[in-house]
Image: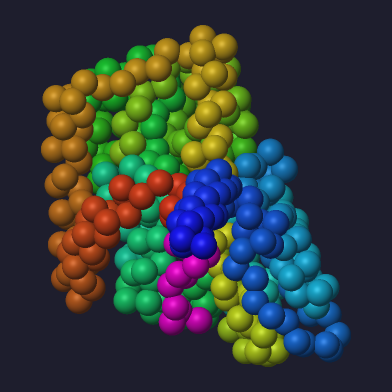
Amino acid sequence: MSDRPWKRRFAAALALAASLSAHAQSNPAEDWLAGRTGATPITYAGAPVEVRFGHPAPPTSLLNQPWQRTFDRLARLSNGKLVIKHQGAGTLIGARDGFKGVRGGVAEWATCYVQNEGRGLPMSRVFEQPFVVPSNPMAGVRIAQELAAKYFVPEFQKQGVVWGSAIVAMPADLMSKKPVRRWEDLNGMKVIAQGFSPELAKAMGITLVNVPFPEAYVALQQGLADGMFWVDAGFIPYKIFEIAKYHTAVGIAGFSINQCYNREFFDRLPADLKDLFYNVQEPMAMVATKISMFDFNRTALATYKERGVEMITLPPPEMQRWRDMAAPTVEKWAADLEKDGLPARALLADIRRLGEKYNRMSPDELVRLSVESPVKGIR
């Protein structure tokens, strides 16, 4: 009898170890996509609700798979009551149509590219500023969600839509037809970039080439551009490495792919479907960022090596020069917005503060956070 407490403690220790081991070996992104986590009870028994989700990404985009699996998850967890009609490749919503299309009811839910709106979203474009995006873009997803209510939601409301979430891209690197090893090597280059600061381009001495990403390959091939600021998740599917054989890791500026939805549609949803729809926003952005950025990078380096791309890493002193040369651009952006009464410097400070908190977390930890403790109060 005296050994029973010991046996109970031993059994409990084994159970705890098994639990911790299973937790460590689990894939939080896969668990969420499969509906094993983050599920909420659904009691709605009425007619199915169909939701149109539109975006311009072509079939080659790495985002299609996590998006579609998210929509499958919603259908499964709602017992077929919330059905997302996935319409990509610009068939419903083009790159410049997100806000207008959602506001007008063309789509209930869509990608809303803040960089393609001429005015009205200056604070939401903060991640386009150089060296503002955290090196861990999944940290950027959480930061954007935490800061949305204070800084971004009001801008989206003025556009007549509801902020859903933001896929924050990895800070952009450069692929070019000539090697770039110093800031001065950029001078005179024609560079493809979207949502890139004109002031930063001027400081670099580059000419921005504004062509849609699907046309970048031809623009480089025909000599209309010498290089391109983008991410591996774009360089590889679009085969930019066939033309531009030099990859310089600079992480200079980012961009976001926002999702927004229609207010009238959301307000009409039954209560439990409304909760299900809202609770999917942050995890969807987090999982999509993990798959298209972190997971994809495992194969990107192998592709570059196979295709003979020279991978250039700037030495720390040169990298610091880039930061120093870009700093006035950020200061001017903030000063201009402050003149208009917008708290741009507070926004930058909040991003730095939260970056210190979340940049240290692993991708799996950030996925779990988005599922178990999503940001509340945006809807």
Instruction: Look at the image and tell me whether residue 98 can be seen.
Output: no
Q: Is residue 361 left or right of residue 304?
A: left
Q: Is residue 355 magenta?
A: no
| Residue farthest right in this picture | 47
Image location (x, y in percent) of residue 254: 38, 46
| Residue in view at x 47 percent, y 70 percent | 374
| Residue in view at x 26 percent, y 22 percent | 314
| Residue in view at x 60 percent, y 68 percent | 38
Q: Which residues are magenta?
A: 368-379
Which residue is more in the foreground, 144 or 376? 376
Which residue is more in the foreground, 136 or 363? 363
Give the colouring mode of the picture.
rainbow
Instruction: Look at the image and tell me whether residue 150 can be seen.
Output: yes
Image location (x, y in percent) of residue 192: 45, 35
Q: Looking at the image, is 273 positioned above or below residue 127?
A: below
Q: Is residue 373 magenta?
A: yes
Q: Is residue 363 left or right of residue 323?
A: right
Q: Looking at the image, is 333 positioned above or below residue 160?
A: above
Which residue is more in the foreground, 5 or 355? 5
Which residue is more in the foreground, 6 or 275? 6
Q: Looking at the image, is 43 positioned above or below residue 133?
A: below
Image location (x, y in percent) of residue 236: 57, 28
Q: Is residue 157 left or right of residue 259?
A: left
| Residue in view at x 32 percent, y 76 percent | 150
Report which quarter residue 144 is drawn in. Answer: bottom left
Q: Is residue 345 left or right of residue 63?
A: left
Image location (x, y in percent) of residue 222: 56, 21
